[in-house]
Image: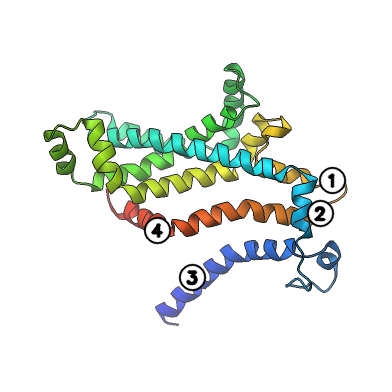
Amino acid sequence: MSPLILRRLAAFAVIVNGLFPAIWILFTSLKTERELMQTPITWFPSAPTIDNYVHAFHDQPLARFVFNSVLVALTSTALTIFIATLAAYAIARLQIGFRNTALSIIIATSTFPLVTLLVPLFETMRAIGILNSYAALILPYTVLSLPVCTLVLVSFFESIPADLENAAMVDGCTRLGALWKILVPLAAPGMFTAGILAFVNSWDEFLLALSFNSVPALRTLPVGITLYQGEFSFPWPIISAALVVGIVPVAVLIILFQQRVLSGLTAGGVKG
């Protein structure tokens, strides 16, 4: 078998593995409960219906869950990119003696399992009195996304010639001014890549959202979706409809910025 055929088979397997669950959830959201349970299994809905979406928004405050997730994810992403940009610039450009140590620490912290951080983070949030608030999720999400985003941006800043910012500073620009006016626009693919990673991490996170916010009005979408199941019932079509609502924003984000994200991932992997 030729290498070309093997590559195409591998690409097909990756596409099927990535798309099939989402497509199955979409089809399930358009079926009735009776059709979903009938045998043999029907792959396509015989009579597609949007009733499950109506019930998803009626049975639980789904719109509120989406709003909470958007607010938390966007805010934590903005904070992450701002802090990661400053940290990455310092590591890439400033002559600091502990550069390698700092990179090692960043890499090490990104490998910690989230469950091991749950109790320390909970105690910290309780000590500063922000449990059951948006800040209880925004701050941890920012901290957890910083290592990966910083590493992505370091590679981009190192790939940009230092002469560009030096020329800007000779013309009267401050170092921070050169960072925001020269380096950040040139590192746009890396910024988008880091932003997408931070947003998706915040959007999908469940454990901290479940543990830090017990107020119903503050629940995010991953936690809110679990409320549709009853003690003895699992309305899968309605749950699937809620899942589709959660998948769409991320899918749209990836589609809109796919070129920048792909260029960012590629450049970040070969430069630096």
128 or 31: nearer the viewer: 31
Question: Under tag 4, what secondary structure?
Answer: helix
**What residue does disc 3 label?**
11
**What residue does disc 2 label?**
235
Asked if disc 2 and disc 4 are in contact, CB closer than 8 Å, the reply is no
Question: Under tag 3, what secondary structure?
Answer: helix
Q: CA distance from mark 3 to mark 1?
A: 39 Å
> Residue, x 71% and y 30% (percent of image)?
214
Disc with the residue nearer the chain's start (4 vs 1): 1
Quadrant of the snapshot with the N terminus: bottom left
Number of marks in picture: 4
Disc with the residue nearer the chain's start (2 vs 4): 2
Q: Residues within 10 Å of mark 1 (few under 14, many from 20)?
A: few
Q: CA distance from mark 1 to mark 2?
A: 8 Å
Q: CA distance from mark 4 to mark 3?
A: 16 Å
Type of the residue with mark 2: Pro
Asked if disc 3 and disc 2 are in contact, CB closer than 8 Å, the reply is no
Q: Which mark is residue 262?
A: 4
Residue 92 in view, yes or no: no
Q: Which mark is residue 257?
A: none
Judge left or right: residue 71 versus residue 25: left
**What residue does disc 1 label?**
230
Disc with the residue nearer the chain's start (4 vs 3): 3
Q: Position of residue 130 (x, y in %)?
A: 60, 22
Q: CA distance from mark 2 to mark 4?
A: 37 Å
Asked if disc 4 and disc 1 are in contact, CB closer than 8 Å, the reply is no
51 or 251: nearer the viewer: 51
Q: Residues within 10 Å of mark 4 (few under 14, many from 20)?
A: some
Type of the residue with mark 3: Ala
Question: Under tag 1, what secondary structure?
Answer: loop
Q: CA distance from mark 4 to mark 1?
A: 41 Å
Judge left or right: residue 232 versus residue 138: right
